[in-house]
Amino acid sequence: MRIVTNSSVETEQLGERIASRLSGGEVLALFGPMGMGKTAFTRGVARGLGVRGEVSSPTFALVHEHAGKIPLYHFDMYRVTSWDDLYSTGFFDYLESDGVLVIEWSENIEGALPETAVRIVVSPGETEDQRIFEIEGLTL
Protein backbone atom coordinates (compact mmCIF):
# COMPACT_ATOMS: atom_id res chain seq x y z
CA MET A 1 0.00 0.00 0.00
CA ARG A 2 1.30 3.46 -0.91
CA ILE A 3 0.22 6.58 0.97
CA VAL A 4 1.43 10.14 0.36
CA THR A 5 1.41 12.76 3.11
CA ASN A 6 1.97 16.47 2.49
CA SER A 7 2.83 17.73 5.97
CA SER A 8 3.96 16.57 9.40
CA VAL A 9 0.33 16.89 10.54
CA GLU A 10 -0.78 14.45 7.82
CA THR A 11 2.11 12.14 8.74
CA GLU A 12 0.94 12.10 12.37
CA GLN A 13 -2.64 11.48 11.21
CA LEU A 14 -1.43 8.49 9.19
CA GLY A 15 0.24 7.10 12.31
CA GLU A 16 -2.97 7.56 14.26
CA ARG A 17 -4.96 5.84 11.53
CA ILE A 18 -2.60 2.87 11.55
CA ALA A 19 -2.80 2.68 15.36
CA SER A 20 -6.56 2.18 15.05
CA ARG A 21 -5.82 -1.15 13.33
CA LEU A 22 -3.50 -2.43 16.07
CA SER A 23 -4.42 -4.68 18.98
CA GLY A 24 -1.02 -5.24 20.63
CA GLY A 25 1.91 -7.45 19.79
CA GLU A 26 2.62 -5.75 16.46
CA VAL A 27 6.02 -4.57 15.28
CA LEU A 28 6.11 -1.50 13.01
CA ALA A 29 9.52 -1.43 11.32
CA LEU A 30 10.30 2.03 9.92
CA PHE A 31 12.89 2.44 7.16
CA GLY A 32 14.11 5.66 5.61
CA PRO A 33 16.68 8.42 5.78
CA MET A 34 16.97 11.04 8.50
CA GLY A 35 14.38 13.79 8.45
CA MET A 36 11.61 11.76 6.82
CA GLY A 37 9.11 12.11 9.66
CA LYS A 38 9.53 8.75 11.38
CA THR A 39 9.17 10.36 14.81
CA ALA A 40 6.14 12.41 13.67
CA PHE A 41 4.57 9.18 12.44
CA THR A 42 5.31 7.56 15.81
CA ARG A 43 3.67 10.50 17.62
CA GLY A 44 0.52 9.73 15.67
CA VAL A 45 0.71 6.04 16.53
CA ALA A 46 1.14 7.01 20.18
CA ARG A 47 -1.89 9.30 20.09
CA GLY A 48 -3.93 6.53 18.47
CA LEU A 49 -2.90 4.14 21.25
CA GLY A 50 -3.99 6.60 23.93
CA VAL A 51 -0.50 7.68 24.99
CA ARG A 52 -0.45 11.02 26.80
CA GLY A 53 2.59 13.24 27.00
CA GLU A 54 5.51 13.96 24.74
CA VAL A 55 6.84 11.44 22.25
CA SER A 56 10.36 12.15 21.05
CA SER A 57 13.03 10.10 19.35
CA PRO A 58 14.86 7.85 21.81
CA THR A 59 18.20 8.41 20.07
CA PHE A 60 20.36 8.25 23.19
CA ALA A 61 18.13 6.07 25.40
CA LEU A 62 17.51 3.66 22.46
CA VAL A 63 14.00 2.88 23.74
CA HIS A 64 11.19 4.90 25.30
CA GLU A 65 8.25 3.18 26.97
CA HIS A 66 4.85 4.86 26.84
CA ALA A 67 1.71 3.76 28.69
CA GLY A 68 -1.60 3.90 26.85
CA LYS A 69 -4.58 1.70 26.05
CA ILE A 70 -1.87 -0.46 24.51
CA PRO A 71 1.75 0.07 25.63
CA LEU A 72 4.06 1.63 23.04
CA TYR A 73 7.76 0.77 22.91
CA HIS A 74 9.56 3.26 20.67
CA PHE A 75 13.04 2.19 19.54
CA ASP A 76 15.72 4.17 17.71
CA MET A 77 18.26 1.74 16.24
CA TYR A 78 20.41 4.40 14.56
CA ARG A 79 23.40 3.69 16.82
CA VAL A 80 22.92 -0.10 16.99
CA THR A 81 25.73 -1.65 14.99
CA SER A 82 26.12 -5.15 16.43
CA TRP A 83 24.15 -8.02 17.93
CA ASP A 84 25.61 -7.11 21.33
CA ASP A 85 24.20 -3.58 20.96
CA LEU A 86 20.83 -5.03 20.00
CA TYR A 87 20.73 -7.43 22.95
CA SER A 88 21.62 -4.59 25.33
CA THR A 89 18.42 -2.73 24.33
CA GLY A 90 16.23 -5.57 25.60
CA PHE A 91 14.70 -5.73 22.12
CA PHE A 92 14.04 -9.47 22.18
CA ASP A 93 12.24 -9.23 25.53
CA TYR A 94 10.00 -6.48 24.14
CA LEU A 95 9.07 -8.75 21.22
CA GLU A 96 7.39 -11.04 23.76
CA SER A 97 5.20 -8.22 25.11
CA ASP A 98 1.61 -7.34 24.31
CA GLY A 99 2.61 -3.80 23.39
CA VAL A 100 3.26 -2.22 20.01
CA LEU A 101 6.89 -1.79 18.98
CA VAL A 102 7.77 1.07 16.65
CA ILE A 103 11.35 0.83 15.42
CA GLU A 104 13.12 3.72 13.73
CA TRP A 105 16.18 2.81 11.65
CA SER A 106 15.01 -0.77 11.16
CA GLU A 107 17.54 -1.18 8.36
CA ASN A 108 20.19 -1.51 11.11
CA ILE A 109 18.51 -4.60 12.59
CA GLU A 110 16.73 -6.05 9.56
CA GLY A 111 18.01 -9.57 10.25
CA ALA A 112 16.43 -9.53 13.72
CA LEU A 113 12.96 -8.35 12.69
CA PRO A 114 10.17 -10.89 13.01
CA GLU A 115 8.63 -12.11 9.74
CA THR A 116 5.31 -10.64 10.89
CA ALA A 117 6.70 -7.10 11.19
CA VAL A 118 4.79 -4.39 9.34
CA ARG A 119 7.37 -2.82 7.03
CA ILE A 120 7.01 0.92 6.45
CA VAL A 121 9.45 2.55 4.05
CA VAL A 122 9.40 6.37 4.13
CA SER A 123 10.91 8.36 1.27
CA PRO A 124 10.83 11.98 0.12
CA GLY A 125 8.10 13.13 -2.22
CA GLU A 126 8.03 15.84 -4.86
CA THR A 127 7.93 18.74 -2.40
CA GLU A 128 9.92 19.51 0.73
CA ASP A 129 7.15 18.38 3.09
CA GLN A 130 5.77 15.49 1.05
CA ARG A 131 6.50 11.93 2.18
CA ILE A 132 5.74 8.62 0.52
CA PHE A 133 4.89 5.71 2.81
CA GLU A 134 5.14 2.20 1.34
CA ILE A 135 3.44 -0.14 3.83
CA GLU A 136 3.60 -3.95 3.74
CA GLY A 137 1.84 -6.27 6.14
CA LEU A 138 -1.12 -4.07 7.13
CA THR A 139 -4.20 -2.79 5.35
CA LEU A 140 -6.23 0.30 6.19
Image (cartoon, rainbow, N blue to C red):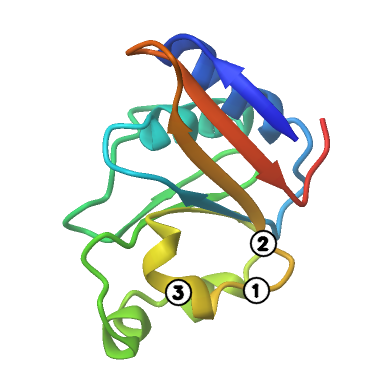
Q: In the rendering, at what x and y percent does residue 73 appear?
A: 48, 54
- Residue indicated by mark 2: 117
Position of residue 24 in the picture relative to residue 47 (left or right): right
Q: Residue at x 16, y 56 (%)?
A: 60
Type of amino acid at the residue the image marks with label 1 = Pro
| C-alpha span from label 1 to label 3 | 11 Å
Tell me if residue 39 comes above or below residue 93 in the rendering: above
Closer mark to the observer between disc 1 and disc 3: 1
Q: Could you tell me which secondary element the residue under label 3 belongs to? A: helix
Mark 1: secondary structure: loop
> Which residue is most to the bottom?
84
Query: How far apart in space, not on screen, are marks 2 and 3 (Cα)?
Result: 14 Å
**First-in-chain label (2 vs 3):** 3
Q: Dot 2: what SS?
A: loop
Decide if residue 69 is in sight here.
no
Which residue does the image show at 67% across and 42% down from the upper left? 135
Left or right of 95 on screen, residue 26? right
Q: Residues within 10 Å of mark 2 (few under 14, many from 20)?
A: some
Asked if disc 1 and disc 2 are in contact, CB closer than 8 Å, the reply is yes
- Rendered image quadrant of residue 66: top left
Q: What residue is shown with label 1?
A: 114
Q: Position of residue 17 (x, y in %)?
A: 69, 24
State the residue at coordinates (50%, 44%): 67
For badge 3, the amino acid type reads Phe
